[in-house]
Amino acid sequence: MRRTLAVLVLACALIAVVAVANAGAAGRTAVIKTKSFDTFVPNPANPPNLLDINHLQWTPGIITVHSGEAIKLINSDNSGDPHVLVIALKKDLPRTAAQIDNIFTNKVVREIAPKLLINVNNPNLGFKAYQTNAGPNGLNQEGDSLVITPGGPHKTASWLVSAKAGTTLYYFCAIHPWMQGEIKVVK
């Protein structure tokens, strides 16, 4: 009798732990931060001065989230720049120096820039929107974008990932296109 009772208590405890763990998973938020560090290299145009190369990146660069889970972007670097996370097809990620230098010729950036910027000919005027949705609500397809700024109310931004499980969303920063990453969506 005691053994049966002990097994029953243990089984109930295990069910409670699984239920609490699953309840917590539904409300989780994955966090992606910006990060920067400086490297100083010789300046061939002006020796002995050094060039300050600022390395901006998303961290972590690859995250795994559940469909329906939120991601939170945090502008935590010291660049003083905004960042625009843009979902793109893998083939449309900027890969070469020419693609990075001419980011406004990128197909996805050409599509979202008029939706986000006050004036596409003068990006320094700022943003008129801080999020674009290319399709159904949520982060799920090429053209979805989120803006985070160095300060103020848009220093962080959260958005639900509504892409189906098994999807990989590739992203880059439209301002610093070498900042790239992946969001792997699971059940």
Image (spheres, grey):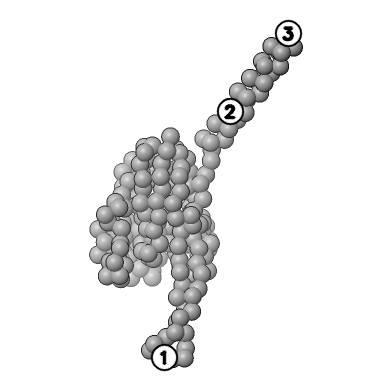
Question: The residue tagged with tag 1: helix, strand or loop?
Answer: loop
In the rendered image, residue 34, in percent from the top left (x then y), is placed at 49, 60
For disc 1, the neighbor class at 10 Å (few under 14, some 14 to 19, many from 20) is few
**Residue at the spot x=50%, y=67% of the render?**
36
Q: Which mark is residue 18?
A: 2
Which label sits on residue 46? 1
Quadrant of the image for the N terminus? top right
What residue sits 37% from the left and 64% below the top?
A: 178
| Local crowd size for mark 2, using a 10 Å CA cut-off: few (<14), some (14–19), many (≥20) | few
Q: Position of residue 37 (x, y in %)?
A: 51, 69
Q: Amino acid at mark 3?
A: Met
Asked which secondary structure carries label 2, the reply is: helix
Q: Nearer the viewer, mark 3 or mark 1?
A: 3
Residues at marks 2 and 3, CA–CA distance in whole angstroms: 26 Å
Report, in whole angstroms, how far the alpha carbon at label 2 lies from the one at label 1.
63 Å
Residue under pointer 3: 1
Q: Residue furthest bottom?
A: 47
On screen, residue 67 versus residue 111, left or right, reads right
